[in-house]
Image (cartoon, helix red, strand yellow):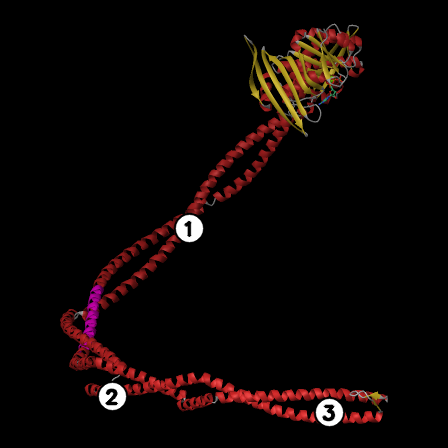
Amino acid sequence: MNIEKIIVDNFASYKGKCELRFNTLGKTISIAGNTGSGKTTLVIDALTFALFGKAYGSDLEKSRGWVVRGPAGKAYVELVFSIDEVKYLVRRSVIASQGRSESEATLYRVIYDGDGEKITAVARGSREVDQKIRELIHMDYKTFMNTVIVRQGDVSGIVEAKPSDVRRIFEEAFGLDFSTALEKAKAEKNLREKRLEEIRGEITQLKRRISEREEVVKQLNSLIFEVNNLNRKREELKTEINKLEDEERTVQRELDETKSKLLTIEEKIEKLNEIDREIKTLEENVLSYIKEVEEEDEYRRRYNDRRSKLSILYEAMPQIIEIQNAETILMEKRKLQNDIKKELVKIEYEKLINELDLFKQNIEREDEIISKKHKLKLRIDEIKGRINVLNEQIRELDSIRNILDVAIEKGEITSCPICGADLTIEKAIKLSDHYSNEINTKIEEKLKLEKHLSVLEEDLDKVEYELDKVKQYKALINPTTEKIRRWTELNEKLNEVSLEIHDLEEKINEEGRALSLRLGKTYTYREAQDTIKAIEREIDEIQVKLDKISEEKVRLSEIRSTIKKLSEERSRLVAETSSYNIIKENFNKLKSKLMEIDKLLDNNREKLNSLSKEIGLIEGRIEENKRKLNEISRLEEELNKLNKEKESLEREIRVYEIIVNDIFSTQGLPLRLLRSRIREVNSYLQNYARKLLRDIRVLIDLSEDKINFKVIRRVDGIDDEKDLSTYSGGEKTLIGFCIRLALAKALARRIGSKVRFLIIDEGLGPLSKDLRSSILEALVELTNEYDKIIVISHMEDIRDSAVFDSRVNIYKDENGNSKIQIPE
Ligand SMILES: Nc1ncnc2c1ncn2[C@@H]1O[C@H](COP(=O)(O)OP(=O)(O)OP(=O)(O)O)[C@@H](O)[C@H]1O
Ligand SMILES: [Mg+2]
């Protein structure tokens, strides 16, 4: 196996895509750079990530996620490697986010055809790719780390470890750690021993149960004998039952036949009874019909009678109607007569005549009253004139007396109001008294006149009243004359109506008499109608009755013929049912016989039942015993199986004892295998020591469970073996380096694959500068064993050593991202 090219992208300290082509570099390559610049990351971590999905020297699966830059993102690696001239390309990436990671992987085969390189996938997905790579390179991660890579820690660790730990380191390197296998073998052994113990217990129990077999067989035989006996008895009983059942069937059949005969006869008897009942009813019907038919004549007579009465009534009907009409008219006339009489009374003829006279007399006095009125009016006017003159005179006299009275009152001398002469108080007083008397006389006269005037005015009122009366009478004269005329007219009408009433009464009396002679009584129109209706109804009823009677007559003859037929059938049935008693007796006999048989049968069946039950019980027991026997056979088989299992367990336990005690014990197989491997390592170690250590020889010594390193120095031509601790630090590192190289070589040979490259990561740690350069020179000699020897170091002298064909510088840029630089 060899590496050709590695590409990283966003991988640990590398940001973006970085590529390193080993195939363009020489055989010896120096990878140089400061501490933490990214050397190991590129050459070892990217390599193990691509091949095994692991990094940072950790065997843990989760280590693949550690290479992601920062808390989240995708890291990618591509590796081209070759095995026996066949090229492969593996691509792996891991995406981490929120503490979880997901990985992808694909392995391709790289084929060169005329046009260039082509790839075809040979495995996909982490699991498949892991498996395929392991098959190709014949190494797991651990072996790869021990075979291809030499790290400083490995080198110093191996020489400084305790001898017992060194053995463990070698065992692990060669995959000879059998401790888990030993534990497993012990566990298996224990498991088997435990099972063996169980089986022994089970076998003892089985044997005990199998020993019951003889007893079970004995019981089974006796039960079979018993059941055979019972079965025979049961067969006998069954035969008897069969016989009885045959007999039962025969009797039952006879009984059924008899029963059906009886039923037929009973039906006929029933029929007979029915006929008797029917005849009886019919005869009763006949009697009632006869009675009704006998009434026929009476109905016919009544029918004719009613008919003739009806025809008389029909004939008289116009006359009845005429009388009825005349009576109606009579009633109307009488009402009219009454009304006229009432009106005549109301008119008060005598009073009217008197009034008319009064009116005429008054009207004749009209002129006389008018001239009386005229005279009265003249007289009144004259008196009124005289009263006015008196009033004037009184007023004048009164005003003179007032003037005088005022002067008298004041005591002044005044002049006479008439002649103008001076007057004294005494004269004035006399004069005033004179005027007062004068005034009184005038007033008396005026009062007399006024009295007369009122009498005259009263008379005038009377005359006026009389004139009004005359006017009224004039107005009343015409209506009164009219009323009198009406009275005369009504009086004439009354005479007329009275005559008519008389005529009508005569006529009604006459015709009524004639009709009552014909009909035996007088009928009003209503009565006549009602009577006609009643007679018609009666005629209808009689008609119905007569119809019914004629129907009954027909029915009667029918019934008579039915009775005759029924009587005939009856005599036939009487003859047919005469054997009833004999058959009935036979039926009863058969019935009691059947009952006897049934009883016997029940008895026998019961016996059979209990016998069957007994047999069932015994058969159950037989079955149980058979089951027991089967179970015993099964147990015997089981015993056989258990015995076989026991034997094989005992054999296996013996084997495991050998494995535990002889093979996997520290003294066993591992020791032998390790011895052979160490022999191999020793032979390579001699070779490397000769080249790198010159006068020092190293031998790996395996004794019991420890590995010691025997270091022999040739001092003055004589071998001197001293403890490792007596050697210098640099010498110890060199010894460790040789051992590590020898181990790597032995491993590479073991796994059968030719590992064509070696990576030494700071493997030359504490060596002096001289020693480092001499080792580097010695390494060149390894170039015939490896196609590529890659030395990683931060030391300048190593970097600059002339032994390297190619140099690669790794550095971190100003942003802290790892970068690759290959100097010209
Ligand atoms: N997932 C990561 N993301 C970013 N940086 C990382 C990650 N893993 C490791 N590193 C850093 O990458 C740098 C390179 O480490 P590396 O082991 O390759 O250094 P080196 O060159 O081998 O140094 P030395 O000479 O000390 O061995 C270190 O600074 C390390 O802390
Ligand atoms: Mg490193």
Residue 762: in sight, yes or no?
no
Q: Which mark is residue 439?
A: 3
Residue type, label 3: Ile
Q: Secondary structure at mark 3?
A: helix
Per the image, label 2 sits on a secondary structure element best described as helix
Q: Nearer the viewer, residue 709 or 39?
A: 39
State the extent of the magenta-drawn residues as a range: 258-286
Q: Is residue 210 above or below residue 15?
A: below
Q: Looking at the picture, which amino acid does disc 1 mark?
A: Arg
Please tell me whether residue 420 is drawn above or below residue 648 in the rendered image: below
Q: Is residue 271 magenta?
A: yes
Q: To which quarter of the image does residue 701 belong?
A: top right
Q: Quadrant of the N terminus?
A: top right
Check if residue 757 falls in the magenta segment.
Answer: no
Task: Tell me whether circle 2 and circle 1 mark residues in contact (CB < 8 Å).
Answer: no
**Dominant secondary-structure state across the stretch colored magenta:** helix
Residue 421 visible somewhere in the drawing: yes
Task: Tell which quarter ligand 2 is in.
Answer: top right
Splitting the image into 4 quarters, where does residue 56 fall? top right
State the residue at coordinates (76%, 86%): 399
Q: Is residue 295 left or right of residue 382?
A: left
Determine the secondary structure under disc 1.
helix
Residue at the spot of label 2 = 506
Query: Which residue corresponds to mark 1?
Result: 621
- State the image coordinates of residue 414 (x, y, percent, origin top left): 84, 88
What numbered label is drawn on residue 210?
none
Residue 713: image location, x then y, percent = 77, 10
Residue 575 placement (x, y as % from top left): 14, 70
